């Protein structure tokens, strides 16, 4: 794998209280968390949006494209992510921020 296509694996800290409250699987949580962080990258070409292809997200977590699409659909139904219908970019919603990110901050 060349340097240009190499993926650096990090980690996801799962906040299980809100994950369970929203009835999300660990995979759905991880996908939403990745969307949150990718959409908040200040060096992004699409500030505020995650433009990673569904395949790329799937590869990162060892999931199929179909699994990622299904997870994003469920997250959208729960108002945790939104999709730009023109570009198909995704981002987490204010509800995600309030229920998951602020939950992390409140625990500190």
Image (cartoon, grey):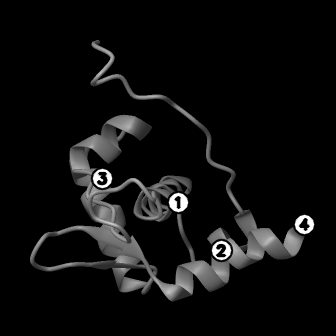
Q: Report the mark closest to the observer, 3 or 2.
A: 2
Does the CB distance between marks 1 and 2 fall below 8 Å?
yes
**Observer-nearest of 82 and 45:** 45
Q: Report the mark closest to the observer, 3 or 4.
A: 4
Marks 1 and 2 sit apart, C-alpha to C-alpha, by 9 Å
Q: Which element carries disc 1, helix, strand or loop? A: helix
Which residue has dot 4 on it? 108
Q: Is residue 69 above or below residue 62?
A: below
Residue furthest right in the image = 108
Q: Answer left or right for 40 relative to 65.
A: right
Q: Report the mark closest to the observer, 4 or 2.
A: 4
**Observer-nearest of 86 and 95:** 86
Q: Which mark is residue 100?
A: 2
Q: Which element carries disc 2, helix, strand or loop? A: helix
Q: How many marks?
A: 4
Q: Report the mark closest to the observer, 1 or 3.
A: 1
Please report the residue visible at 33 percent of the width from the left and 46 percent of the height from the top: 57
* Picture quadrant of residue 20: bottom right
Quadrant in the picture for the C terminus:
bottom right
Comes first in the chain, label 3 or label 2: 3
Q: Residue 5 at what x, y percent from top left?
A: 28, 24
Which residue has dot 3 on it? 67
């Amino acid at each position: 794998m060349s340097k240009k296509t190499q993926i650096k694996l990090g980690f996801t800290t799962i906040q299980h209280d809100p994950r369970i409250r929203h009835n999300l699987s660990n995979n759905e949580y991880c996908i939403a968390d990745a969307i949150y962080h990718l959409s908040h990258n200040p060096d992004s070409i699409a500030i505020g949006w995650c433009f990673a292809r569904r395949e790329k997200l799937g590869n990162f977590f060892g999931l199929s494209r179909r699994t990622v699409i299904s997870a994003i659909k469920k997250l959208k139904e729960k108002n945790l992510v939104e999709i730009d219908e023109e570009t198909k970019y995704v981002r987490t919603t204010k509800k995600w921020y309030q229920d998951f990110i602020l939950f992390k901050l409140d625990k500190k």
